[in-house]
Image: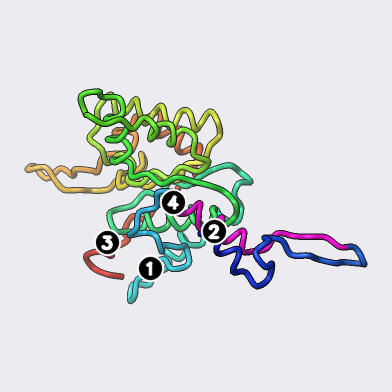
């Protein structure tokens, strides 16, 4: 498909190069059609779910009639765009906190696609799906083998972990995610993660006990381990979307 796109290019005639001349000196430069073809190939291999295939930072849905939330999301959108512009100057990724339907996955995918357009590569994993694929790859009784998923999570230039901490917490799961985060931390590899869990300093109320005592949402550190959560904070710029309405139910 990429070769067909290049062959159809009117600028380079399918060669992928454009002849240039400056001050009487001839040269050549890459045609944009090569970059477009490369971008499509990398996106197609990144594992981005079809539901989010069209997600970009610019088409992030803004609420109507709620100026406070709109201002909050406008600031978030600006920060994600700033991250893409500056990447990889400080080497950090992104860590999104927020409730369901607040747009975390949309922004994470939008950031990944924007980085791909800058020449980087990345891999998207739904956290629960990744853990299950790794478990089956290590369990002979499961009847399948997918050891490549764990290696992909270790090796990806940019790793997107969506819904981090959604899998039932066990010692094995904590060890797996600590292994992935620890490896990427030590090798200075970028992580973009989203989670519905609270940050350590968040007080997100989920209900009350029969006696009226508040029940707060569990924190990321409680589910994936404090060591892994601490390293993620060092590796990422933290962005919080608490208080943003769930667009799936209420619209924006």
Q: Alpha carbon of mark 1 to alpha carbon of mark 4: how far?
A: 17 Å
Q: Alpha carbon of mark 2 to alpha carbon of mark 1: how far?
A: 31 Å
Q: Is residue 231 magenta?
A: no
SS of the residue at dot 4? strand
Earlier sequence position, callout 3 versus callout 4: 4
Q: Alpha carbon of mark 3 to alpha carbon of mark 4: how far?
A: 17 Å
Residue hosting label 1? 61
**Relative to the observer, which residue lies in front, 60 or 34?**
34
Residue hosting label 4? 239
Earlier sequence position, callout 3 versus callout 2: 2
Q: Alpha carbon of mark 1 to alpha carbon of mark 3: how far?
A: 11 Å
Q: Position of residue 147 (x, y in %)?
A: 36, 29
Where 57 sits versus 99, above or below? Answer: below
Disc marking residue 246: 3
Q: Is residue 38 magenta?
A: yes
Q: Where is residue 172 in the image (x, y as percent from the top left)?
A: 28, 24
Q: What stretch is highlighted in magenta?
A: 26-45
Secondary structure mostly taken by the magenta-highlighted segment of the chain: helix
Earlier sequence position, callout 4 versus callout 2: 2
Residue at x-position 25% and y-position 64%: 248
Q: Where is residue 103 in the image (x, y as percent from the top left)?
A: 36, 59
Q: For the residue carrying disc 1, how many other residues have a C-alpha within 10 Å: few (<14), some (14-19), or many (20+)? A: some
Residue hosting label 2? 2
């Amino acid at each position: 498909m990429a070769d067909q796109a290049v062959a159809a290019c009117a600028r380079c005639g399918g060669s992928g190069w454009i002849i240039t001349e400056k001050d009487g000196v001839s040269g050549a430069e890459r045609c944009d059609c090569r970059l477009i073809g490369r971008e499509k190939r990398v996106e197609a291999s990144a594992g981005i779910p079809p539901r989010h295939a069209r997600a970009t930072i610019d088409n992030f849905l803004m609420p109507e009639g709620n100026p406070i939330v709109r201002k909050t999301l406008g600031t978030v959108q600006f920060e994600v765009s700033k991250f893409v512009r500056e990447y990889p100057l400080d080497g950090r990724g992104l860590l999104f906190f927020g409730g369901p339907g607040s747009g975390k996955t949309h922004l994470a995918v939008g950031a990944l696609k924007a980085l791909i357009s800058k020449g980087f590569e990345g891999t998207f994993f739904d956290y629960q799906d990744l853990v299950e694929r790794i478990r089956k790859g290590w369990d002979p009784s499961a009847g399948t083998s997918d050891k490549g998923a764990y290696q992909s999570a270790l090796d990806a230039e940019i790793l997107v972990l969506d819904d981090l901490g959604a899998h039932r917490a066990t010692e094995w799961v904590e060890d797996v995610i600590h292994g992935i985060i620890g490896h990427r931390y030590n090798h200075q590899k970028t992580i973009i993660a989203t989670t519905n869990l609270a940050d350590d300093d968040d007080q997100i109320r989920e209900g009350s006990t029969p006696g009226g005592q508040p029940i707060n949402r569990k924190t990321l550190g409680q589910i994936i381990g404090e060591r892994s959560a601490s390293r993620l904070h060092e590796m990422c710029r933290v962005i919080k979307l608490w208080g943003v309405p769930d667009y799936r139910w209420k619209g924006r």
